[in-house]
Image: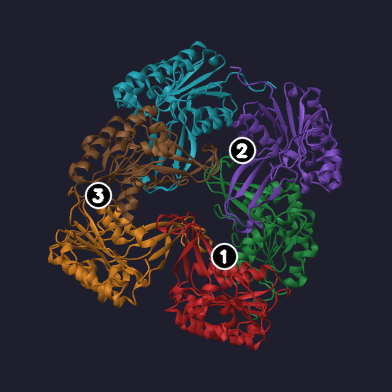
Chain colours: A cyan, B brown, C purple, D orange, E red, F green
Amino acid sequence: MGKWPRLPDVIGLGEIMVQFNAVTPGPLRHVTFFEKHAAGAEANVTVCVRRQGLSSGFITRLGADEFGIYLYNWLRGEGVDVSQIKFDTTAPTGIYFIQRGFPIPGRSSVVYYRRGSAASKLNEEDISSEYFADARVFHLTGITPALSESALKTSKKAVKCAKNHECKLSFDTNIRPPLWKDAEEATKTLLPFVEQADILFTDLADTMILLGEKDVDKAIENYPFDGSRDRGLQTWGERRFSRLKKGENKG
Amino acid sequence: MGKWPRLPDVIGLGEIMVQFNAVTPGPLRHVTFFEKHAAGAEANVTVCVRRQGLSSGFITRLGADEFGIYLYNWLRGEGVDVSQIKFDTTAPTGIYFIQRGFPIPGRSSVVYYRRGSAASKLNEEDISSEYFADARVFHLTGITPALSESALKTSKKAVKCAKNHECKLSFDTNIRPPLWKDAEEATKTLLPFVEQADILFTDLADTMILLGEKDVDKAIENYPFDGSRDRGLQTWGERRFSRLKKGENKG
Amino acid sequence: MGKWPRLPDVIGLGEIMVQFNAVTPGPLRHVTFFEKHAAGAEANVTVCVRRQGLSSGFITRLGADEFGIYLYNWLRGEGVDVSQIKFDTTAPTGIYFIQRGFPIPGRSSVVYYRRGSAASKLNEEDISSEYFADARVFHLTGITPALSESALKTSKKAVKCAKNHECKLSFDTNIRPPLWKDAEEATKTLLPFVEQADILFTDLADTMILLGEKDVDKAIENYPFDGSRDRGLQTWGERRFSRLKKGENKG
Amino acid sequence: MGKWPRLPDVIGLGEIMVQFNAVTPGPLRHVTFFEKHAAGAEANVTVCVRRQGLSSGFITRLGADEFGIYLYNWLRGEGVDVSQIKFDTTAPTGIYFIQRGFPIPGRSSVVYYRRGSAASKLNEEDISSEYFADARVFHLTGITPALSESALKTSKKAVKCAKNHECKLSFDTNIRPPLWKDAEEATKTLLPFVEQADILFTDLADTMILLGEKDVDKAIENYPFDGSRDRGLQTWGERRFSRLKKGENKG
Amino acid sequence: MGKWPRLPDVIGLGEIMVQFNAVTPGPLRHVTFFEKHAAGAEANVTVCVRRQGLSSGFITRLGADEFGIYLYNWLRGEGVDVSQIKFDTTAPTGIYFIQRGFPIPGRSSVVYYRRGSAASKLNEEDISSEYFADARVFHLTGITPALSESALKTSKKAVKCAKNHECKLSFDTNIRPPLWKDAEEATKTLLPFVEQADILFTDLADTMILLGEKDVDKAIENYPFDGSRDRGLQTWGERRFSRLKKGENKG
Amino acid sequence: MGKWPRLPDVIGLGEIMVQFNAVTPGPLRHVTFFEKHAAGAEANVTVCVRRQGLSSGFITRLGADEFGIYLYNWLRGEGVDVSQIKFDTTAPTGIYFIQRGFPIPGRSSVVYYRRGSAASKLNEEDISSEYFADARVFHLTGITPALSESALKTSKKAVKCAKNHECKLSFDTNIRPPLWKDAEEATKTLLPFVEQADILFTDLADTMILLGEKDVDKAIENYPFDGSRDRGLQTWGERRFSRLKKGENKG
């Protein structure tokens, strides 16, 4: 008994969606079969962390439909705590389709059906401060604040709760242009999260949008990031993962 | 040369969607693979009519995306005139999923992702009066007026254009409860189409909603339908198809 | 917080296996593709009970392999408590194949790879008496005591723990001839469970084996079942489910 | 109205076939599943040209069978004018199978079922001179003249019609040895087309067959090609596409 | 050693083909995937007989291609003697496609690519008289004599060889109209085989063609069949199998 | 008649299993579909040799089940003599699953269900000395002696029979650690086979286990291999195939 930790080590907040992956490559107009998966940047982090042995929990809203149940059971099956997930009866679960190898060979592109999805209905009441009591890391990406006005407020409250419990903020800028009106809106919204981040994941493309700065060295110099914490600002090949201790790469 | 009739015999107006059919039966949460098809009540009529040898054309808006191109090419491939189809850059193509044999064995249920779809952006400018010049039948269902306020106006203009060119109105009541606020809204919106119909497809369920009348004989007696035209009001087993010449079934 | 009931309402004990279902009917020699599922008589009960709103838990041993992880995550995903499941590093997870429609059309047959599986390593230490503290029903079938000598002892201890906590024993005779040396062994082993059962599931085939009695009325008369409890002894068409209150069906 | 160009910019003549692509690599004896596609060198050109915004039309004969209807609808769906396609009731639609990665890894080989196909029944009556009135390019390959005696005559008439309407001849030598009795027959038949070509696609292998000349520079020098027109005679890596303006590559 | 019977009990002669079965029902134009099988009326008999414990052998010509190798290995794998099968380098292996449930629900239709196939090249040299030395039954259908002039001669020689070795002739009329010029040709060609048959499989449709007689009783009365042998002339529901001992069904 | 060689040129002894290949890459817990194949190191050799034109035969025990029949028919279909294969009614056919690309991308791993399989029941009575009368090569791997005590004795008897008929022993060390208690057991069991081998296949990993020697040159120097015969002791890239004439690689 009592094996399961009451409160998780790592908490994620965001949208988890059903992904329909084209079985054959080429433009979707010619694809006949699609394979269902579960996917979402923040959800993936909570699952990976769990596989490594830490406890984790995920906060979101899902549609009260079969796809919502699928995602709920998938997260629960992976051992992620789902006690903070709500089923929203007013909006569907977000989904998207993956087109493979077209128009650019070897690259994928994405078609979303997420506008007005259940996750965009996230609101401040979905965040319970006590849930962060034992958490060491709260992971958020730049996608969640872009989902809706109420999702932005929810993100801010979650950050505040994390800070109140000395839980570190892990933030991945993850700017998806189709989700924003313009670069200015993205900048204005996301910079406050960057400034509060303890661990940061980003890349050059996002940095250029956020700082309006194309010179990498200058970007690192001016990055709005408190030196007393861990930080990341480096693109590693094709991979988005990066981590940089302040001063380490600079003379 | 010149084989293709400039203007179609039969015209349809409505939404055509991409259907994702579960490859295996059961709740969608457990389905892994889905097969893509094209489907839509009014589009199906234009395709079937074409296969029987008449010319036909379809009026709609599609998303400017791969699924829109798929539907456009599918209709064109079947020989349906697509000259009146517009690609809308502000909204996605509507899609839906089919769950088979669950919860009721042998029955299917449907999950829509069509709210705010390209077809809901249909407006009066999409209807060209000259397009009806040679048409003998204009086919409409109760789905199209339910898509949006502008789609309702588009439906009305199309009926007016048809009447101006002595083209018969074929109307299928096809009431989909999830698309309507309440029965009253459906009744108020659809009765004018029923009253103008020259050919009518309906069934008892729809009749009960439209007339608030459960007695079949009374329903036929009171059906708001001009006796000088063909009419239909009879359910034929599971099939929705029905046709009734005035007076024929009554003493 | 604290939504999850610490101790389950319903507890199952037994083997859960990976099922490989032939995608096409006919003899397995001609089948090319197989589809993976999770299955097991007792596990299915804990999942169904969970879907109806009760809490449930499952006790077993799984191989420390990918198939074991699959089953663990599947149960957990369905909301079944998995705190009592152990991974056994000395034995593989049991699996089986389903052949469809051959040699008897419309019927399935089964090929097991379960001999020496992890579940056959179940032993008395796997049963924690406190786990039954809040349980209302403990479900067991005649399969588990047949798996091995230690699995039989485990079954007996679990029944004793249930009885100690006033938890009812639900027993499904479920005699699988390939798992038993002979009918005598099955009878000697299973009758004590039947005698202690509060709820009983059985059918004529099993009754004939257990009582050596082919006359249904006599079988009911002589059934070794305490009248102060619920009981079942009736075959319902093809279905194995049956329930009979003492005296109800008899004059 | 009137959007569709009456007569196409680009015209293709040849055979379009149903391709059955092995789903798994290896010798066809071991392949269980095949995926249907539409394919044909000249048809592909008319489809690609159409996707780039020009109008195009295709001339062929198809079997009056399901595969013929499939190909007809596919071309029509892609927007290619099909008014000149005839269904032949005396011969089947040509088909072929693709074996992948065997015997040479990374390469495909082909099994044809095209002998006596509907396209081999093409005859001069299938070419309507007026159809070329607005055409800018007529595309032909060395496959079509190889299909049958009547297909050769059809090819010649089509070239004459093109020339009469100042439509350029685009010719791809495309010598498929299995379709010819011997190299001499291919040479005698194809050289006249090469000599009349305005745009030429070829490669070294075909050049060696047509000119009996292995030296590239000599081949270019002696190529039977009128210098006042565009020309091509160069292999570009693995790709067959080549284009060479007279004198450009020579000092 | 020496377990394999040198000469078979049952011999079949005919065409075995690769069957491509539509994975989904409906017109082939809409089918994307096809599943490969081996099939042929006479080959099926040799395989079934083998599964029942008798030895059997099959005589045919296959294309010297992957499909030919597939069929050769399939027969050999089933234990059928393949020593009399020749690979023909001048003609392809016959194939066909199965369309399911269209246009008649529940019924299949077939598209052949067998004209000029390797089996149509069968000739008298393919029949070795000694091969029939131990045979008890030689099975032939009305398909083989219809394949070509040389296949007809081959069939006749095989019947003669069988008769010489006191091997019974099992003949299934199996008239496939597309393989015959007209009913007269079928009648003239097949009646001699019927007259020599010891075991006959036929049905009413074939009987009407062969005898020009629609009255069943009269057909049985006049059937050109030697009374000293087993005979069959009865349709059993949808199944083609029939067997009738002379005089048994008649007063 | 009499085309089939009574006794094979090449003989293999070992286990042939049904392989279930994951259709999609990743951990098996997430794989839904599996594709059935036949596989086994020694069986593959007899099939390849047969495709090259030699005759071959395979000695094993299969389960008296559908998977056993599948393997039997597959070998027979490939032309391998199956007269020495026995169906064992007391044990199942061995099977295994292939996981692709996980945890190491580009590499496969394997999950066996072969313990106590039919092949482990191989015993000395399964070896008929006369079967080796015409054989030129007997192929064995280090897997077969590891299956069971009786399989080891069977291997020894087969080697003796081969030697008696001047048939060369081809031995592939092929040490699969999960099949052995420890390295010592493998060494003690396999060295005698190495010493008797005429043709040897091995690699560095196996050599290190067998000789306890990591230095390649020393290993070659000390390899317990009679110089008067062919020998192999060289790793060729990733491939296990190696062959070395004594003295050739050494100064």
User: In the image, which disc is placed on residue C70?
Assistant: 2
Q: Amino acid at mark 3?
A: Arg
Q: Residues within 10 Å of mark 3 (few under 14, many from 20)?
A: some
Q: Position of residue F32 (x, y in %)?
A: 56, 44
Question: How far is mark 3 from mark 1, CA to CA?
Answer: 45 Å
Residue reaching furthest to the bottom: E164
Please say if D52 is above or below F103: below
Quarter occupied by residue D67: bottom left
Pointer 3 indicates a residue of which chain?
B
Inspect this view and state whether residue E54 appears: yes
Inspect this view and state whether residue F200 appears: no
Discs 2 and 1 share one subunit: no
Q: Which residue is mark 3?
A: B136
Please say if B163 is above or below F191: above
Please say if E59 is above or below D18: below
Q: Amino acid at mark 2?
A: Tyr
